[in-house]
Amino acid sequence: MAKLELNSVNLSIQSLYRMFRDNEFYVNRQYQRKLVWTLEEKQKLIDSIMKDFPVPLVLLSKRGADGTSYDVIDGLQRLHTVFSFIENAFCTEDGRNFDMRQIPRAAQAAKEDGRRINSDDDSILNPDECAAFSDYTLPITIVERASDKDIINIFERINSYGRRLSDQEQRQAGLSSSFSRIVRQLSCEIRGDASEDNVPLAQMPEISVQGVRTVHDYGISAEDTFWTKQGILHSSSLRDSLDEQTVADIVACVLNKEPIQRSKAALNKIYDPGQKDYEKFEHSLNKYGEDDFKRDFLTVFDHIRLTCDRIQVGTL
């Protein structure tokens, strides 16, 4: 990997929020996970900012030739937490909301979206607290020019430290293969969060999974997914992409024309370009045709889902 051109800046939360509202932040679903932080994790970050504690840097990569928008390489959960707190998606640990009137762009967005602006002085941060929060600067590192391969390499290295991705998230992260692509697409179709590979950060809540014990206003209810309704997976398992791992197992068995060994090692080999199984399953899928495989898989899956629904309501 050639030496990258990096630019380090400190940007205030208010400046970052303006960029967010202008749809300058994008998420690449080929390697980024969904929104997965718990309420407690979000509140701890907000508390750190309110106490003026340092927080980890955010890593961005310029998109396109004009460089007016950015892919979020590292810091997705933190950025979304900050922006959603401003928009009153959750409160502080002591039960108070940010006063959106202190950031005109936030108040304007709330009005346009038909959201209520909390003006109860007893349940919102005071003006000084809001000003301190808005002026807090986050350390930002911008990758000025980088290939997709470089960005994926960076992402993988970052996630080898600290809080690790789940096994399946690591397998899928940035791997541009026919097998990984079909698994990602089928998993999204089954969950109900199919989208383009690159989506604005503002749209991430719509395609993220809401758990039973979470209070986030996300678009996909874990309890309503096929996997949870049929008792195949616990709702919390979707946070770690175990549904995608299940799809990967099924796809591999279909392509193999018999069950594969159900183990972490066996699945890892299918995702590892250096292994014979990688080439074997890529060849099988390309021979079948990705579009044809996706169509046939979803046709069979829809029949299974319909049968399960009829059994549950007693109409079979």
Image (cartoon, grey):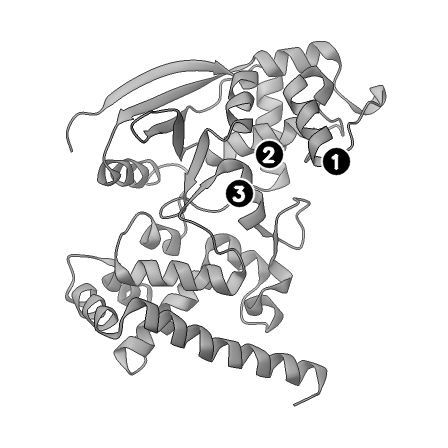
User: Label 3 belongs to which residue?
Assistant: 204
User: x, y (%) of residue 151?
Assistant: 28, 36
Question: Percent position (x, y) of residue 110?
Answer: 70, 30
- Which residue is label 1 attached to? 114
Q: Crowdedness of circle 1 by 10 Å Cα count: few (<14), some, many (20+)?
A: few
Going by the numbered disc 1, the residue's amino acid type is Gly
Residue 260 seen in the figure: no
Describe residue 258's horizontal placement relative to residue 44 as left or right: left
Judging depth in this view, the residue of 225 and 274 nearest the camera is 225
Across and down, in percent, residue 75 comes to 44, 32
Alpha carbon separation for disc pair 3 and 2: 16 Å
Foreground of the two, 260 or 283: 283
| Above or below 210: residue 148 | above
First-in-chain label (3 vs 2): 2
Q: Neighbour class for label 2 at 10 Å: few (<14), some, many (≥20)?
A: many
Residue at the spot of label 2: 42
Q: What amino acid is labelled 2 in the image? A: Lys
